[in-house]
Image (cartoon, rainbow, N blue to C red):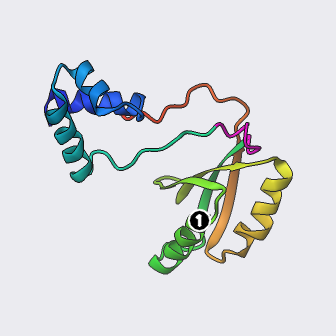
Amino acid sequence: MDPIDRKILELLQADPTLTTNEIASRDNLSVSPTFERVKRLEKEGYITGYVALVNPYKVGNGLIVLCNIRLKQHSKTMSNEFVEAMKSFNEVTELYNTSGDYDYLMKLFVRDIHHYQDFVLNKLGEITSIGQVHSVFVIGQEKHSTIVPVV
């Protein structure tokens, strides 16, 4: 990856709606090489997709909850059961396997505290591999970015 590829990645992260012409003009390239570079970056897995970022408050899911999860045991079966269940829940937007006191950290969006209570009782409560849940409610989002630094 060269500096031009890095610039293309930075531009597309900032605005994925940019056309090939717009990227080319900002990169001082012609359209055809720019198009080929973008396609190569996609093919090689540097670009994994394009999304529209939705304001959670506007769609009624303004409560962000971070949950630390400890499994009952460290086994492949329990871990797989937990991960597959989390993948099926729309509320869960991010899931990380972590080190330290907890096994997983997940981020979820819910309408309100009642929605979260329902999620814990009727979804998490049905997963037998969970040993402990520790929840943190976000009261203010001071920084949010989807941009990955390109070095």
Label 1 sits on what residue type? Met
Q: Which residue is denoted by mark 1 in the rendering?
A: 86
The image quadrant where one finds the C terminus is top left
Residue 28, image x and y in percent?
Answer: 18, 19
What residue lies at 70% left-to-right and 29% top-to-bottom?
Answer: 140
Residue 149 seen from this side: no
Indicate whether 145 appears above or below 68. Answer: above
Q: Residue furthest right?
A: 114
Q: Quadrant of residue 150?
A: top left
What residue lies at 26% left-to-right and 31% top-to-bottom?
Answer: 8
Q: Residues within 10 Å of mark 1 (few under 14, many from 20)?
A: some
Residue 12, image x and y in percent?
Answer: 35, 33
Judged left or right of residue 133, residue 82 is left
Mostly what secondary structure, the magenta segment? Answer: loop
Residue 45 forms part of the magenta stretch: no
Judged left or right of residue 87, residue 99 is left
Judged left or right of residue 11, residue 109 is right
* Residue situated in front as seen by the camera: 77 or 11: 11
Q: How many marks?
A: 1
Residue 148, image x and y in percent?
Answer: 37, 35
Q: Which residues are magenta?
A: 55-62
Q: Quadrant of residue 58?
A: top right
Residue 33, image x and y in percent?
Answer: 14, 34
The image quadrant where one finds the N terminus is top left
Residue 56 seen from this side: yes
Indicate whether 23 appears above or below 75. Answer: above
What residue lies at 55% left-to-right and 65% top-to-bottom?
Answer: 87
* Residue situated in front as seen by the camera: 124 or 71: 124
Q: Quadrant of residue 89?
A: bottom right
* Residue situated in front as seen by the camera: 23 or 70: 23
The residue tagged with tag 1: helix, strand or loop?
A: helix
Judged left or right of residue 109, residue 96 is left
